[in-house]
Image (tube, rainbow, N blue to C red):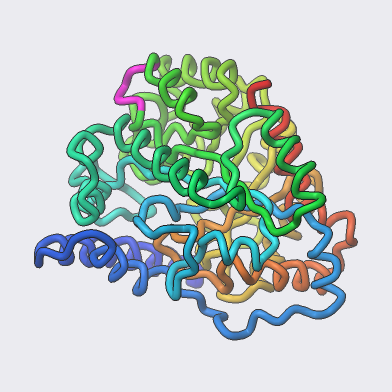
């Protein structure tokens, strides 16, 4: 019953997102006004005002390299260099939370009223968001152009940050940034990810275009099945197609990690059988803690671990089972018991039309919750970021 309630809550949230955005466009709001309406309703922080961790956790957290594998903050049009009173993530809050690195995802195509069970290819929610923010015309309609526009959005903010925000594209970028941050901890960085291979528009040659734009993680499917792979929320839910198998090999060669967070079970099995590089589930849960189609069964957690990859535990109730940081910690522990402490990380899904117990500034509370669940300092350091750094070093181009 609890799992069904979580699924219904997720469906209501996604439906409300579509309705609110459409309403904002329909009444003529433009720019940040339309999407701010959505953000204030959907990107709630259920634990706001209680971000006080223990002295022990604060001291430990200060010495961690915290990595969040997935956030959707680029989509909403906020200037992430400015602290916002709504949403989950911006650079000031990343700095407050000691977050060293975040994967900023480009959601390229979302159907009208998305749900977790079965989505037909009807409507285009991202186009409504693009219209409300007055994106350039090519980015309103073209899937590749959307990805390029969002990459440019991140680069523009990094260029204007005075060095506070770094974009990571290569292994050398990562190493140089981490060395700099060791002496200047009030820095943060981001890498680009794509949520759904719709950005390729069915053309594998566009993968090179996206790689040149700096994308370093790619999910072959999101809410819809694609020509490359089935989605956990699609109509067919098939595995990798012949085109998808080519995508996997070409992405690995280009230094782009495969992300199976929204993939169908058949797709995940195919990726695990064929991958030669570590596989990532950037933002998910585990069924050992929370049942549901959105979360990974035991064998696939172990399979991702066997590739050397990492499972990023999500912060929203459908993924972690509750509305407090203890729920996130419990899911982390369940994933560790399945895949080993070297293969578990964080994937908040901040600003992904979900509610979370903390925003980016509250990350020390999660360190506190992991301490309370009995993890050692070394284990917490691995989960909070060291595992993700290892995988990125293994997948980023040299």
Q: Position of residue 289 (x, y in %)?
A: 65, 61
Give the residue at x 58% y 72%.
358
Identify which residue is drawn at 35% across, 56% down: 77
Percent x, y of residue 51: 65, 79
* Residue 69 visible in the picture: no
Q: Residue at x 70, y 82 (%)?
A: 52
- The boundaries of the magenta stretch are 200-204
Q: Decide if residue 19 is in sight here.
A: yes
**Residue in front for this viewpoint, 327 or 99:** 99
Q: Is residue 133 above or below residue 328?
A: above
Characterize the magenta stretch by its predominant secondary structure: loop
Q: In the displayed image of the protein, which residue is found farthest to the bottom?
A: 49
Q: Is residue 340 above or below residue 36?
A: above
| 201 in the magenta segment | yes
Locate residue 279 relative to residue 127 in the image: left or right: right
Given residues 333 and 40, the one toward you in this image is 40
User: Residue 239: x, y in percent?
Assistant: 45, 28
Q: Is residue 250 above or below residue 309?
A: above
In the picture provided, is 55 more to the left or to the right than 273?
right
Of the 4 image quadrants, the one containing the C terminus is top right
Q: Nearer the viewer, residue 92 or 360?
A: 92
Figure quadrant of residue 78: bottom left
- In this rendered view, identify the residue nearer to me: 232 or 144: 144
The quarter of the picture where residue 174 lies is: top right
Counting labels gives: 0
* Relative to 155, 379 lies left or right: right
Q: Is residue 305 above or below residue 312?
A: above
**Residue found 74% across the figure and 36% down from its top:** 176
Tell me the quarter of the picture where residue 137 sits.
Answer: top left
């Amino acid at each position: 019953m609890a799992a069904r309630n979580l699924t219904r809550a997720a469906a209501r949230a996604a439906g409300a997102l579509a309705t609110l955005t459409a309403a904002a466009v329909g009444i003529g709001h433009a720019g940040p006004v339309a999407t701010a309406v959505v953000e204030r309703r959907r990107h709630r922080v259920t634990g706001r005002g209680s971000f006080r961790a223990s002295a022990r956790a604060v001291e430990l957290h200060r010495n961690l390299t915290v990595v969040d594998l997935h956030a959707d903050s680029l989509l909403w049009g906020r200037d992430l260099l400015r602290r916002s009173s709504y949403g989950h993530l911006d650079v000031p809050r990343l700095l407050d939370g000691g977050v060293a690195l975040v994967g900023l995802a480009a959601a390229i195509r979302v159907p009208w009223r998305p749900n977790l069970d079965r989505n037909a290819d009807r409507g285009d929610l991202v186009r409504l968001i693009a219209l409300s923010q007055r994106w350039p015309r090519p980015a309103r309609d073209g899937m590749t152009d959307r990805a390029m526009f969002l990459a440019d959005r991140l680069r523009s903010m990094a260029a204007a940050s005075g060095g506070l925000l770094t974009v990571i594209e290569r292994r050398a970028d990562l190493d140089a940034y981490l060395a700099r941050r060791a002496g200047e901890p009030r820095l943060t960085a981001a890498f680009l990810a794509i949520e759904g291979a719709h950005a390729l528009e069915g053309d594998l040659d566009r993968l090179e275009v996206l790689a040149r734009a700096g994308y370093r993680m790619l999910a072959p499917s999101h809410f819809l099945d694609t020509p490359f792979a089935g989605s956990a929320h699609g109509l067919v839910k098939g595995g990798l197609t012949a085109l998808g198998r080519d995508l996997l090999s070409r992405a690995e060669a280009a230094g782009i990690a495969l992300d199976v967070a929204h993939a169908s079970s058949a797709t995940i099995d195919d990726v695990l059988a064929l991958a030669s590089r570590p596989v990532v589930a950037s933002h998910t849960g585990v069924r050992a803690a929370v049942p549901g189609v959105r979360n990974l069964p035991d064998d696939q957690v172990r399979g991702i671990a066997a590739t050397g990859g990492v499972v990023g535990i999500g912060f929203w109730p459908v993924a972690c089972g509750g509305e407090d940081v203890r729920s996130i910690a419990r899911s982390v522990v369940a994933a560790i018991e399945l895949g080993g402490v070297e293969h578990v990380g964080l994937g908040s899904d901040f600003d992904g039309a979900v509610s979370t117990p903390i925003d980016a500034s509250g990350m020390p509370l999660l360190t506190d919750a992991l301490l309370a669940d009995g993890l050692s300092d070394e284990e917490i350091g691995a989960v909070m970021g060291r595992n993700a750094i290892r995988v990125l070093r293994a997948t980023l181009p040299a």
